[in-house]
Amino acid sequence: MNTLRGSIVPMVTPFTEQGAFDEPTYRELIDWQVESGSHGISCAGTTGEPSSLTIEEREYLLEVTVEQVRGRVPTVLGTGSTNHTETMRLTKHAERLGVDAALVIVPYYNKPSQQGLYEHFRTVADSVDIPIIVYNIPGRTGVNMEPATLARLRRDCPNIVGVKESNKNFEQVSHVLHHCGRDFNVYSGIEELCFPMLALGGAGHISATANLMPREVAELFDLCEEGRWDAARDLHFQLLELNEALFWETNPGPLKACMAMAGKIKPVIRSPLALPSDEMQGRLRQVLAKYNLV
């Protein structure tokens, strides 16, 4: 569990102008992230548009990620789906690839009960030996994984080792650590809450902003680990405007537009998502200019 700490970057999935997976660009992005000091690589989370990929594309994305990372940093790869059978298939595939952990989202659209969530995650965890990190993002799934349910899963499933809390209700984080134990790995999935969560004892963050500023987002964790809280607080406020701008519209629309402006990817996102309007892209460019990203 101690290796699964720090800034674990939720990679975008770059596409060609024809809408196909842009594998060469993706491999370059992984190398850049590792060289920039990111502590781990994640893919096929919300930022990676997993619901826009076929299951075969998702399996191949996992394969490419593990191959390109080459064990240089831990891999925490998204295997969750709203479909239970697909989640099982992807998680077992991740285990065969030798990933360090699977990131399994709370099923979206279905809005299962807490008992339904328990049974879903218990079955997935029991089917593999790799660590499982629950991905709780109620704003996108329509249901919250309650701290008591997480505690029950931790008690019954030794390989459920943490949770990514993309939860605007910051009170939840304290209750999760209280119910699950303060050695439970809790990661921030809300960019503005990365620093506060580290102050509570969080294990790190899985922040979309790291796709643009990997060194700084990793440094935020490093400063806290070193006990340099004033410097970390300054960096938190330095990143605040960019963190906010990247969520002016549904993620990863603004992020992909910004990465295209910065010359990292082509400006392509799969339907039904869309890139921001020209007006909003102008506003985003102004923010990027403040960070010397364009």
Image (cartoon, grey):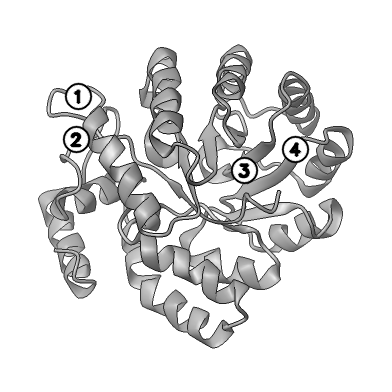
Q: Quadrant of residue 111?
A: top right
- Cα gap from disc 3 to disc 2, whole angstroms: 27 Å
Label of residue 268 in the image: 2
Label 1 vs 4, first from the N-terminus: 1
Label of residue 19 in the image: 1
Give the SS element for disc 4.
strand
- Disc 2 residue type? Val
Please provide percent x and percent y for residue 160. 75, 37
- Disc 4 residue type? Ile
* Mark 1 and mark 3 residues within 8 Å of each other at the beta carbon: no
Q: Quadrant of the C terminus?
A: bottom left
The answer to whether 274 is drawn above or below residue 200 in the figure is: above
- Cα gap from disc 2 to disc 4, whole angstroms: 35 Å
* Mark 3 and mark 2 residues within 8 Å of each other at the beta carbon: no
Please provide percent x and percent y for residue 204. 59, 59
- Cα gap from disc 1 to disc 3, whole angstroms: 29 Å
Residue displayed at 26% across by 25% down: 21
Mark 2 closeness class: few <14, some 14–19, many ≥20 residues within 10 Å? many
Label of residue 136 in the image: 3
Give the SS element for disc 2.
loop
Label 2 vs 4, first from the N-terminus: 4
- Disc 3 residue type? Asn
- Disc 1 residue type? Gly
Label of residue 160 in the image: 4
Q: Quadrant of residue 118?
A: top right
